[in-house]
Image (cartoon, rainbow, N blue to C red):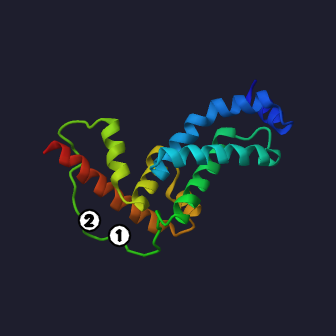
């Protein structure tokens, strides 16, 4: 089935279509949720909740819509809501003008770190930094889109991205020592 047929099938409450959607998108949704929540168990629960919500709301989705993007948006919003409700994630609206003299960090690493190591470093950052870095670098959202998702100023997101990136580079550089 193509995406249009899958959406139509899900709108008709067709179990086979729903299972195809689930199997096609569960890993992408889980990866997104775990990067935000930093907990496999919470991410698994969120993915299940998001599929239930998606199948309940799919009647509102246009048949030519990007199903994957729609599902990703649901899982990101739900993950952020859960994170906020547990006081794990704080987007401060502190407005810091970008400092004129940024701390210089040499982007040239002596050796290329593994993806696993970079993910571990990202997970060890404060939530406000790791979420913004994940949404920007991995999920490929713009600063403006992230600001809208988190209901904050774009300048705050840009600052958190810059600070998170600096902290991430410091952690990665420690590997070289």
Q: Nearer the viewer, residue 136 or 23?
A: 23
Residue 15 point in image, percent of width and height: 79, 31
Q: SS at mark 1?
A: loop
Q: Residues within 10 Å of mark 2 (few under 14, many from 20)?
A: few
Q: Is residue 120 left or right of residue 151?
A: left
Name the image quarter holding residue 156.
bottom left
Q: CA distance from mark 1 to mark 2?
A: 8 Å
Q: From the viewer's perspective, tell me whether residue 101 is left or right of residue 154.
A: left
Tell me how many marks there are. Answer: 2
Report the side of 111 relative to 35 (left or right): left
Label 1 Cα neighbours within 10 Å, binned few <14 / some 14-19 / many ≥20: few
Q: Which mark is residue 64?
A: none
Q: Is residue 132 visible?
A: yes
Residue tagged 2:
102
Quarter in which the N terminus is drawn? top right
Q: Determine whether 113 is above or below 107 in the image.
A: above
Secondary element under disc 2, as helix, strand or loop, is loop
User: Is residue 70 in view from this perspective?
Assistant: no
Q: Residue furthest left?
A: 177
Asked whether 53 or 98 is in front, the reply is 53
Residue located at (64% from left, 43% from top): 48
Q: Label 1, on which residue?
A: 98
């Amino acid at each position: 089935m193509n995406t249009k047929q899958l959406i139509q099938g899900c709108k008709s409450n067709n179990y086979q279509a729903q299972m195809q959607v689930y199997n096609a998108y569960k890993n992408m949704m889980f990866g997104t949720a775990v990067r935000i929540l930093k907990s496999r168990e919470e991410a698994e629960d969120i993915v299940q909740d998001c599929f239930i919500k998606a199948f309940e709301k799919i009647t509102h989705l246009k048949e030519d819509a990007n199903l994957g993007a729609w599902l990703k948006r649901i899982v990101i919003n739900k993950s952020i809501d859960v994170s906020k409700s547990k006081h794990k994630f704080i987007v401060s609206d502190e407005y810091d003008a970008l400092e004129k003299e940024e701390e210089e960090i040499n982007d040239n690493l002596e050796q290329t770190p593994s993806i696993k190591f970079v993910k571990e470093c990202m997970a060890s950052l404060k939530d406000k930094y790791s979420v913004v870095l994940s949404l920007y670098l991995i999920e490929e959202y713009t600063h403006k889109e992230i600001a809208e998702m988190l209901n904050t100023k774009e300048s705050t997101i840009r600052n958190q991205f810059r600070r998170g990136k600096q902290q991430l580079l410091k952690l990665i550089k420690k590997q070289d020592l």
